[in-house]
Image (spheres, grey):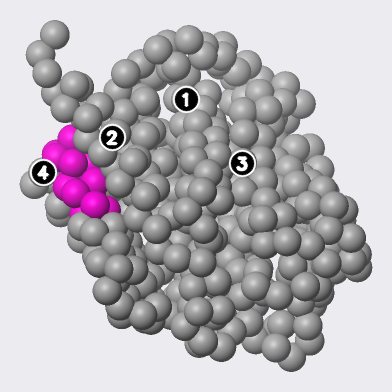
Amino acid sequence: MSYSKIQRWSYSVPAALLLMAPFDILTSLAMDIYLPIVPVMPRALGTTPAVIQLTLSLYMLVLGTGQVVFGPISDIVGRRPVLIGGAALFAASSFLLAAISSAPLFVVLRLLQAVGASAALVATFATVRDVYAGRPESSTIYSLLGSILSLVPALGPITGALIADRFGWRAIFLVLGLLSVAAFFNAGMRWHETRPAVTAKIAVRPILTSFPFWVYTAGFSAAMGAFFVFFSTAPRILIDRAGFSGVGFSVAFATVALVMIVTAPFAKRFVIGWGTAGSLARGMATLLLGAALLAFGELFLQPSFGSFVVPMWIIAIGIVLTTAVTANGALDGFGDTAGTAVAFYFCVESIIVGFAGTFFVILLGGDSAWPLAGYVCATALTTLAGLRLLRKPA
């Protein structure tokens, strides 16, 4: 394999991070900054809460499934064209979202925004693999990108609430557009092509027929889906039912992300002690404990910070324990096909989260804790059953 083109990428780790991080951040920010205005969007667009829920679900689904499309495309045409094209589409759709008042067009533009985000995200992480594979800087890059990204759920809703309170909901999408334009021009000047001259052959069947892949991907879906259902229901529970202001909701929401940030540094110690399978099992058990507390609060308490957010702190700890090991468990043993395996890992997770998460929200109602408790119980118990089968000797 020839890596002649990669030699052009000579940035230091801080410089590379400043170049890559904006695309990683914008992908998540487009979801989190939007949350405080979810309750007002049905009235603003003359539609129903179900349609607004669709804008959340479609974004999540397209973000994941798009990687399976754009990953191979980036292997053929290069990382830079996919990144630049994705950033341009994200920027254009963001500006149009700030300008329209049609609910169907709003859904379509959110879908296009997710397509752009998916392309930029896969090009970013493909570039990390191209440049830093086998080098000690790789762990630093991944760690720093993860640490930066963990701040987005904490700061995104607060930022969105402050912008919407002062300038209106359209300003949120205008800000996303301006930030993406800045990232677009920065990448246009400095993002050199890194695609290897020869890429590994794509092999899908060994991935999709691997039972460990499905068990650990199910665990990843349980963890990430819990967060998805939480931010899908939290605005209606805390703002509509509990009477939180937009800023108050954002602060409450941010505490969940802060619990994840505080827990993350301890995850490595737990994994060393419990192992990969043991950490996944304990992560699922922690999710189930949080779901039980949510059910108790829904049955016997009024909607409040204590009945809804505090149990989510427990679930947040389970998310950290789970996501610390699921990638290694799902991708172990694929060698040269690791890039394809990563794409399918995120794609399958997005499909499960998007469809199953939305199903529980629609079935059980998005203004209670039941969708979150139901989703966690269904996916965590399924993962534990698969883990038990995985541990049985052949």
Which residue bears the numbered disc 4? 274
Residue 319 percent location from the top left of the image: 32, 54
Q: Is residue 344 above or below residue 304?
A: above
Residue 59 percent location from the top left of the image: 66, 49
Real-space Cα separation, disc 2 to disc 1, in angstroms: 19 Å
Amino acid under label 1? Ala
In terms of image quadrants, where is residue 65? top right
Q: Is residue 60 magenta?
A: no
- Near-viewer residue (290 or 360): 360
User: Residue at coordinates 47% horizontally, 53% vertically from top-left?
Assistant: 364
Quadrant where the image shows the C terminus: top left
- Near-viewer residue (300 or 293): 300
Residue 192 percent location from the top left of the image: 71, 42
Identify the mark nearer the N-term, 4 or 1: 4
Disc on res. 341: 1
- Which of the two discs, 4 and 2, sits closer to the camera? 2
Q: Is residue 281 magenta?
A: yes
Q: Secondary structure at mark 2?
A: helix
| Magenta stretch in the rendered image | 275-288
In terms of image quadrants, where is residue 180? bottom right
**Crowd rating for badge 4 (residues with CA inside 10 Å; few <14, some 14–19, many 20+):** some
